C-alpha cells in the first residue's frame, strides 16, 4: 500500500503537477484561486492515473494541460492566456472522450463505473467554463460566478463522481444507485437552477444533501483496505456534509431572498473544506489503495448477422430443441414444453399495449420499424393474429449453436425476426436471442425459471441476463429489460405476458393467447 502511494505520488506527472502548483502560487494574487489550480495540477492528474493505463498519449495531453495552466499565470496577454486555456480545454475533451469510450465498452450496467464515466465527461464542462473565464467571454454572469462554475465542475462534477465510483467498487447496496443518480444529476440541476429557476437550485441542494449524508452513513459501514484509508475517505465525505449545509443557506438566499452567508465567506469556508479536506484527503485515500473494478467482461456468444436476415434454411418445428436444457420441465404443464419444442403447432393472437407516456414515441418509431421490418409492432391494442415460420440459420453465418429464426408477421408486414440460440455460463443455460438491426444486432439474454407452475423468462436475472446492442466487437448493455410469464389456462390454452421497461419504467406490454391450430 505504501509502495502504491509512493509510486503514484512521486511519478513524473505527479511531481510535475506539484512543481507547477508551487510555481503558480507565486503568481496568483488571490489565494482562493489556488483551489481550481490544485484540482487542475494535482488532484485530476492523480485520479486519472488510477483510472486508465497511462500511455504516451495520456502523458502528452497531461503535460500539455499542466504546463498550460501554469503558463496562464505567467503570460501577461489575454490572447496568450486564451490560447493556453484552450489547450487545457482540449485536455478535458480528451478525458471526456475516454469516459465515453469506457461507457460504450460496457453500457448501462455497474453504477460505480457509470459514476466514473460521467465524472470524466463532466470535466469537459468544467474546461468550457474555465476557458470562458480566462477568455473573458460574456456568459451572462459575473467573472467570479463563471470561475465558481468552473471549480464546481472540477470538484463536484469530476472528483466527487470519480470518488463515488471508487467507493462503489467496495460497497453495493440498494441505496447506492440512488446516491449515484442524485450526485450525477446535481451539477446540472444546480447550474440550471442558478440560470433559470432559483427554487430548482434549492430543491436540488436538498436532494444532494440527502445523498451526501446517505453516502457518509454508508462510508462508516464499509470496510476499506486499511484504517488510514477509511479515515481519509470518511473525513473527505464528512467535509462535504459540512459544506453542503452552507450551500443550502446560499441557495435559500437565491430562492427566497434572505442572506444567511456571504459569498466571501463561502469562498474561504468552501475553499478550505472542499479543497483541503475533501479534495486532498480524498485523493490521498484512493491513491493509497485504489479498488479494482468488479465489472465482468461480456464473453457470451453473439450473433454475427447484421441487417436483414438472408438465406434462412429448412423449417424447424420449435424455438428450441429441448426445453429441459434451460429449466426443470417437470415444474410446469406439458403444454408449455410442447409450445417451445413444437411451436409450429400453435396459433398466436397478440394484443399490443403501449404505455400512454410512450405512445408519441411509438408513433414516431413506427415509420422506421416499417422500413426495417424489424421490431415492427402495431400501434393498436386490437387483438391481432401473428403468423410465423421457424427456419434454420447457418451456424457458420451466425456464429452460435444451432440458430433458428422465428419470423413473425401481421398480414404482410414482418413484426419480428428473432434468431434463437443458447449458451451456458457457470452451469446455467441461457436463451440467447438476436434481432438483426442495420449494422448491429440487439441481443436478449434470458434466464428461464419455473415459478408456481408457470415459465418465467427474464432479462433481469443474474449473470449474463440482459438486453444488449452488439456493434462490431463492442457489446453495450441497454437500459431495457423484458419479462415473460407463460401459463396454462383451462382447456390447454396458454397465455403469455410480455412486459418491457426502459430505465425501469414500463413502456410496453404484449398479451398473447396461444392455442393449438
Image (cartoon, grey):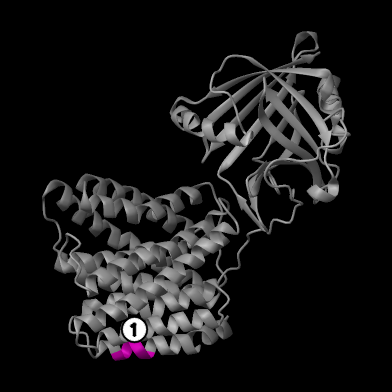
Q: Which residues, given as a range, are shown in magenta?
A: 19-23
Quadrant of the image containing the N terminus: bottom right
Which quadrant holds residue 247? bottom left
State the predominant SS element of the stretch in magenta.
helix
Give SS at disc 1.
helix
Query: Quick one: label 1, few (<14), some, or many (20+) residues within 10 Å?
Result: many
Reading the image, the residue beneath label 1 is 68
In the image: residue 296, left or right of residue 46: right
Find out whether residue 21 is within the magenta segment. yes
Which residue is located at x 59 percent, y 22 percent? 352
Which residue is located at x 61 percent, y 37 percent? 372
Residue sitting nearer the eye, 1 or 251: 251
Quadrant of the image containing the C terminus: top right
Q: Position of residue 198 (x, y in %)?
A: 20, 48
Which quadrant holds residue 508? top right
Residue furthest out toward the top = 491
Q: Position of residue 507 (x, y in %)?
A: 52, 31
Amino acid at each position: 500500500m505504501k509502495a502504491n502511494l509512493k509510486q503514484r505520488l512521486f511519478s513524473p506527472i505527479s511531481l510535475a503537477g506539484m512543481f507547477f502548483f508551487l510555481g503558480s502560487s507565486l503568481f496568483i494574487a488571490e489565494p482562493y484561486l489556488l483551489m481550481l489550480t490544485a484540482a487542475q495540477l494535482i488532484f485530476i492528474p492523480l485520479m486519472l492515473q488510477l483510472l486508465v493505463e497511462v500511455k504516451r498519449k495520456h502523458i502528452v495531453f497531461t503535460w500539455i494541460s499542466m504546463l498550460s495552466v501554469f503558463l496562464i499565470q505567467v503570460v501577461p496577454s489575454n490572447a496568450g492566456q486564451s490560447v493556453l486555456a484552450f489547450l487545457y480545454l482540449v485536455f478535458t475533451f480528451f478525458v471526456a472522450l475516454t469516459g465515453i469510450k469506457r461507457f460504450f465498452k460496457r453500457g448501462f450496467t455497474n453504477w460505480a463505473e457509470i459514476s466514473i464515466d460521467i465524472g470524466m465527461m463532466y470535466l469537459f464542462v468544467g474546461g468550457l467554463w474555465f476557458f470562458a473565464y480566462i477568455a473573458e467571454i460574456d456568459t451572462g454572469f459575473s467573472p467570479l460566478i463563471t470561475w465558481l462554475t468552473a471549480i464546481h465542475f472540477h470538484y463536484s462534477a469530476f472528483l466527487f463522481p470519480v470518488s463515488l465510483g471508487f467507493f462503489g467498487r467496495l460497497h453495493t447496496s440498494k441505496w447506492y444507485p440512488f446516491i449515484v443518480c442524485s450526485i450525477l444529476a446535481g451539477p446540472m440541476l444546480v447550474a440550471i437552477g442558478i440560470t433559470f429557476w432559483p427554487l430548482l437550485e434549492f430543491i436540488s441542494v436538498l436532494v444532494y444533501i440527502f445523498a451526501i449524508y446517505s453516502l457518509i452513513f454508508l462510508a462508516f459501514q464499509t470496510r476499506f483496505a486499511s484504517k488510514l484509508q477509511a479515515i481519509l475517505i470518511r473525513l473527505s465525505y464528512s467535509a462535504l456534509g459540512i459544506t453542503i449545509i452552507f450551500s443550502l443557506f446560499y441557495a435559500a438566499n437565491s430562492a427566497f431572498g434572505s442572506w444567511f452567508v456571504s459569498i466571501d465567506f463561502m469562498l474561504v469556508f468552501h475553499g478550505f473544506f472542499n479543497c483541503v479536506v475533501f479534495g486532498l484527503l480524498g485523493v490521498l485515500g484512493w491513491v493509497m489503495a485504489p479498488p479494482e473494478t468488479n465489472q465482468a467482461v461480456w464473453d457470451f456468444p453473439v450473433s454475427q448477422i447484421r441487417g436483414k436476415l438472408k438465406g434462412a434454411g429448412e423449417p424447424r418445428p420449435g424455438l428450441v430443441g429441448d426445453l429441459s436444457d434451460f429449466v426443470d420441465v417437470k415444474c410446469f404443464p406439458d403444454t408449455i414444453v410442447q409450445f417451445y419444442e413444437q411451436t409450429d403447432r400453435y396459433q398466436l393472437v397478440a394484443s399490443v399495449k403501449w404505455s400512454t407516456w410512450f405512445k408519441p414515441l411509438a408513433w414516431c418509431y413506427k415509420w422506421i420499424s416499417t422500413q426495417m421490418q424489424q421490431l415492427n409492432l402495431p400501434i393498436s391494442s386490437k387483438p391481432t393474429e401473428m403468423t410465423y415460420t421457424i427456419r434454420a440459420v447457418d451456424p457458420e453465418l451466425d456464429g452460435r449453436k444451432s440458430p433458428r429464426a422465428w419470423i413473425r408477421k401481421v398480414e404482410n408486414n414482418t413484426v419480428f425476426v428473432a434468431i434463437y440460440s443458447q449458451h451456458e455460463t457457470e452451469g446455467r443455460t441461457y436463451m440467447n436471442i438476436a434481432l438483426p438491426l442495420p449494422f448491429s444486432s440487439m441481443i436478449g439474454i434470458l434466464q428461464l425459471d419455473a415459478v408456481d407452475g408457470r415459465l418465467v423468462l427474464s432479462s433481469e436475472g443474474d449473470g449474463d441476463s440482459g438486453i444488449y446492442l452488439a456493434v462490431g466487437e463492442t457489446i453495450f448493455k441497454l437500459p431495457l429489460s423484458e419479462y415473460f410469464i407463460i401459463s396454462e389456462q383451462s382447456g390447454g390454452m396458454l397465455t403469455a405476458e410480455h412486459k418491457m421497461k426502459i430505465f425501469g419504467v414500463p413502456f410496453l406490454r404484449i398479451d398473447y393467447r396461444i392455442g393449438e391450430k
